[in-house]
Image (tube, helix red, strand yellow):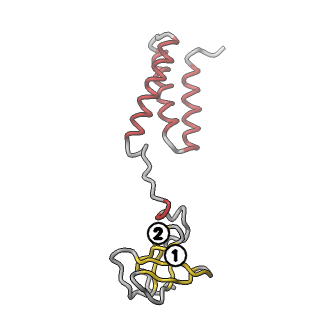
Amino acid sequence: MAPAGLFWWVGAGVLIVLELMSGTFYLLMIALGFIAAALARLAGANVDVQFVLAALVALAAVLLLRRSRFGRKTRKAAAINPDVNLDIGQTLAVPAWRDRKARANYRGAAWDVELAPGEPEDARVYEISALDGSRLIVVASKRAGDN
């Protein structure tokens, strides 16, 4: 039969391998708890102390990770996130403006288009920067040759 402390080392190894597949760092923090328990086992602590230590170290490590820059994902609003709206970043031609609003053909349909604050009305080619419901918010395109 395997030594009792082997459970902690094997568990830590499995968690580290799973972490390599997920890439989130959370399983790595729990593996730190397992390693702390394995070290407590080597120091002669009984099983209850090992489990409490594993839980406390894992909890503290997860909480520290959550407070760090690695634990927080900055999420863009869906209206301006090109991963959600594939139209963001695409270009379209706007023939004429009326009070910073227009109708323009884009992808075979007529869309309501609104000019973003501070953008010029004379660019002719615009880039979609956001979607507000069924309205396209556009900025002047920095790519001169696009249409």
In this rendering, the answer to whether 128 lies above or below 73 is below
Q: Residue at x 58, y 38 (%)?
A: 18
Badge 2 density bin: few <14, some 14–19, many ≥20, Cα 10 Å: many
Q: Position of residue 104 (x, y in %)?
A: 52, 83
Q: Residue at x 58, y 20 (%)?
A: 6
> Which residue sits furthest front?
99
In this rendering, the answer to whether 120 lies above or below 3 is below
Q: Residue at x 40, y 81 (%)?
A: 100
Q: Which mark is residue 127?
A: none
Q: Which mark is residue 130?
A: 2
Q: How many marks?
A: 2
Q: Nearer the viewer, mark 1 or mark 2?
A: 2
- Identified by mark 2, the residue type is Ala
Badge 1 density bin: few <14, some 14–19, many ≥20, Cα 10 Å: some
Residue wearing tag 1: 90
Pick the residue in front: 63 or 127: 127
> Which residue sits furthest right?
1
In this rendering, the answer to whether 139 lies above or below 14 is below
Secondary element at image label 2 = strand
- The quarter of the picture where residue 121 lies is bottom left
Q: Are marks 1 and 2 in contact (CB under 8 Å)?
A: no
Q: Position of residue 61 (x, y in %)?
A: 42, 32
**Left of 11 or right of it: where is 55?**
left
In this rendering, the answer to whether 58 lies above or below 121 is above
Secondary element at image label 1 = loop
Q: Earlier in the sequence, mark 1 or mark 2?
A: 1
C-alpha separation, residue under disc 1 versus residue under disc 2: 10 Å
Q: Quadrant of the N terminus?
A: top right
Q: Position of residue 32 (x, y in %)?
A: 47, 29
- Identified by mark 1, the residue type is Gln
**Left of 138 or right of it: where is 109?**
right
Q: Position of residue 26 (x, y in %)?
A: 49, 37
